[in-house]
Image: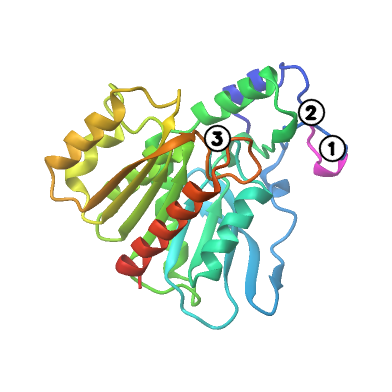
Amino acid sequence: MASANALSICALPRIHVSPNPAALPPTAPVLQIAGARETLVASEIAKETAEMFEQDVILTTKHGRMPAFVACPDGAGPFPPVIFYMDAPGTREELRNMARRIAKNGYFCLLPDMYYRLGTVRFDIPRRDDAMSAVIRASMNSITNALVTDDTAAVIAWFDANDKVKSGPVGCVGHCMSGCYITTVSARFPHRMTAAASLYGVNIVTDKPDSSHLLLPEIKGELYYAFAEHDQSVPAHVIPELRASLAKTDVVNTVKVFEGTHHGFCFAERMVYSPQAAEQTWADIFDLFKRRLG
């Protein structure tokens, strides 16, 4: 059943809503809210190439059926697992390509569609306008740290039942809205989440009782935070407060601010893309995974 947020979304202009994925025109700007969760993923058909194994899967969570994209090197494995939490615009080919890059470096990467509670939500980002931005914000605000914790528990259980996934430590990466999620799950699963990376993460330090930075003392893994120098989504007090909070713990951490960059600088399809900074974050993340995941 769609949530109240989904109902308000439907009234916005330039948003296509359909209970049938096939009914969406090829150029539909953006949002589909499915009438039944069975339509969330067309099939669970494995795609195997000479180098990679890919599959669309559905995980059973505390709240329903969550679609996810998985990728790993071809072969029996097992491979160290990485959860790739989506940013606010949601799952799309751009993120799947990034998941593939993680997989090509020797990891079993799972990209969950965390908007599954709303139905099927897809955005045509190149055609983004004010109406679409409002939908993105509403979708983003439908997720809480507690819900992500529940979803992550389901992902870890799924990893543990999969022969291709190496048991033990789990890594995670989050862009934008998922910066607070990687922090939260690192605390909620301290003996499993050993390597977590945030790229221009938002809402990491807030005045809310569930602010992720309050959980830092519970974390046993290593944290990596990469921020843009220019980011309206990250208030000026956040980075100093994050550093101060980390300094009060024993958590191994890295906090970097990339000079001259803007929010989203790792996304190659955006005008703000910064190749040098993006490649440095990739190098940093893979170094982190090598240390903590193997």
Query: Is residue 67 highlighted in magenta?
Result: no
Q: Which residue is mark 3?
A: 88
Residue 128 x %, y %: 70, 27
Disc on the earlier residue, 3 or 1:
1
Q: Nearer the viewer, residue 20 or 137?
A: 137
Q: Which corner quadrant holds the C terminus? A: bottom left
Q: Mark 3–mark 1 contact, CB under 8 Å?
A: no
Q: Mark 2–mark 1 contact, CB under 8 Å?
A: yes
Q: Is residue 61 visible?
A: no
Q: Which residue is mark 1?
A: 24
Q: Is residue 122 above or below residue 46?
A: above
Residue 95 x %, y %: 60, 50
- Residue furthest toward the bottom? 76
Q: Nearer the viewer, residue 19 or 103?
A: 103
Q: Residue 16 got which mark?
A: 2
Q: Amino acid at mark 3?
A: Ala
* Displayed quadrant of residue 235: top left
Q: Which corner quadrant holds the N terminus? A: top right
User: Crowdedness of circle 1 by 10 Å Cα count: few (<14), some, many (20+)?
Assistant: some
* Displayed quadrant of residue 227: top left
